[in-house]
Amino acid sequence: MILGFKETFIPAIVAGTKPHSIRAGFRWRASMSIQFYQGSYHQKRNKFRPDAVATAVQQVHFKREIRVAPTADPIVLIDERRLTPEER
């Protein structure tokens, strides 16, 4: 499946320092092929690295406490486990 990225993220993806990508929906499964492109379906696209395989898929949720000030950091849950401040 094609993953489109903004130019900002490409150096880190190519260097291997950005191994994760958060996407909406439930289309992804472990072992699916990934094609890495810069640009969208409607723009001229550029493939910037060889294909890879998704090794894992996790559910990610971002929540805000209503009782807390609007500027408070969101609660981040991965596979229903709340991340600690050090992990965020």
Image (cartoon, rainbow, N blue to C red):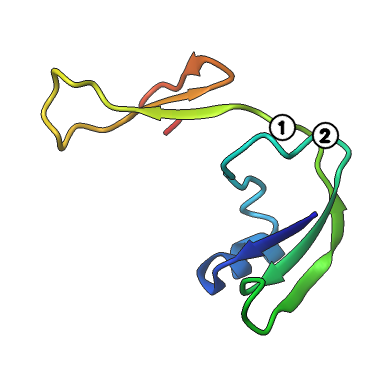
Q: Name which of mark 2 and mark 1 comes first in the sequence.
A: 2
Identify the element where label 1 is drawn.
loop
Point out residue 59 in the picture as x, y percentages from the top left corner.
Answer: 60, 27
Q: Which mark is residue 30?
A: 2
Q: Which residue is pictured at 61% across the width and 47% down the height? A: 21
Classed neighbour count for the residue bearing mark 1: other residues with Cα under 10 Å, few (<14), some (14–19), many (≥20): some
Residue 55 falls in which quadrant of the image? top right
Q: Is residue 14 left or right of residue 11?
A: right
Point out residue 87 in the picture as x, y percentages from the top left corner.
Answer: 46, 29
Q: Residue furthest bottom?
A: 44
Q: Which residue is pictured at 62% across the width and 68% down the height? A: 10
Q: Is residue 71 above or below residue 41?
A: above
Disc tally is 2
Q: Is residue 69 above or below residue 46?
A: above
Say which amino acid is labelled 1.
Answer: Val
Depth check: give the residue in front, 56 or 29: 29
Q: Which mark is residue 68?
A: none
Depth check: give the residue in front, 9 or 68: 68
